[in-house]
Image (spheres, rainbow, N blue to C red):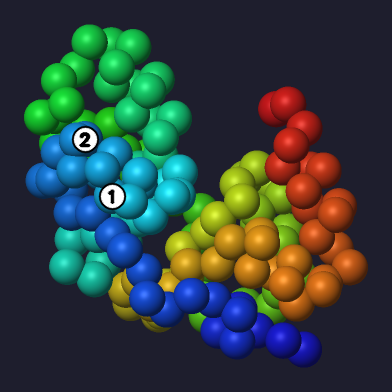
Amino acid sequence: MQTIAEIMTTDVEVVRPEETLRDAARAMADLDVGSLPVCDGKKLIGMITDRDITVRAVAEGKSSDTPVSEVMTDEVVWCSESDSVDEVLQKMSEAQVRRIPVVDEDRQLVGIVALGDIALEEDDDVDETLRDISMPS
């Protein structure tokens, strides 16, 4: 049984809670991603997405200098590096997310895994997970 540790990306770009929305948006643009983990040191404390910036910040008239901590999602779905691919696909499906941070036993960020990473391993359950993620909640 393959674990997420075998698939995950370990070189993860993060933002700190005190960084601004402008910093987060610039990092997302540079990396061509729609979400970034928010870490206090190495401890995962949230996720910030392009949708968070749009819906929780711009739509509410917040400044681009607003700290990430004010609009980030702090109830993060995460997985352990020892979780199986099937367990992670289930978590992604239930939370309707395409990318999930990977933490160790101290909730220190050690990686991130995307549905595309799993698809490259040719897992049969990816199609079903993508369907579940894409369904309106």
The x, y position of residue 126, in whole percent, is 80, 60
Q: Amino acid at mark 1?
A: Ala
Question: Does any portion of residue 46 appear in the rendered image?
Answer: no
Q: CA distance from mark 2 to mark 1?
A: 10 Å
Q: Amino acid at mark 2?
A: Leu
Question: Relative to residue 90, is residue 131 drawn left or right?
Answer: right
Q: Quadrant of residue 58?
A: top left
Image quadrant occupied by the C terminus: top right
**As drawn, 124 above or below 24:** below
Question: Few, some or many C-alpha atoms within 10 Å of disc 1 (few <14, some 14-19, many ≥20)?
Answer: some
Q: In the image, what residue occupies the spot 60% across and 87% down?
A: 6
The x, y position of residue 62, in whole percent, is 19, 17
Of the pair 50 and 125, the residue shown nearer to us: 50
Question: Does any portion of residue 108 appear in the rendered image?
Answer: yes
Question: Relative to residue 10, is residue 137 drawn left or right?
Answer: right
Mark sitting earlier along the chain (2/1) = 2
Image quadrant occupied by the N terminus: bottom right
Mark number for residue 21? 2
Label tally:
2
Q: Quadrant of residue 37?
A: bottom left
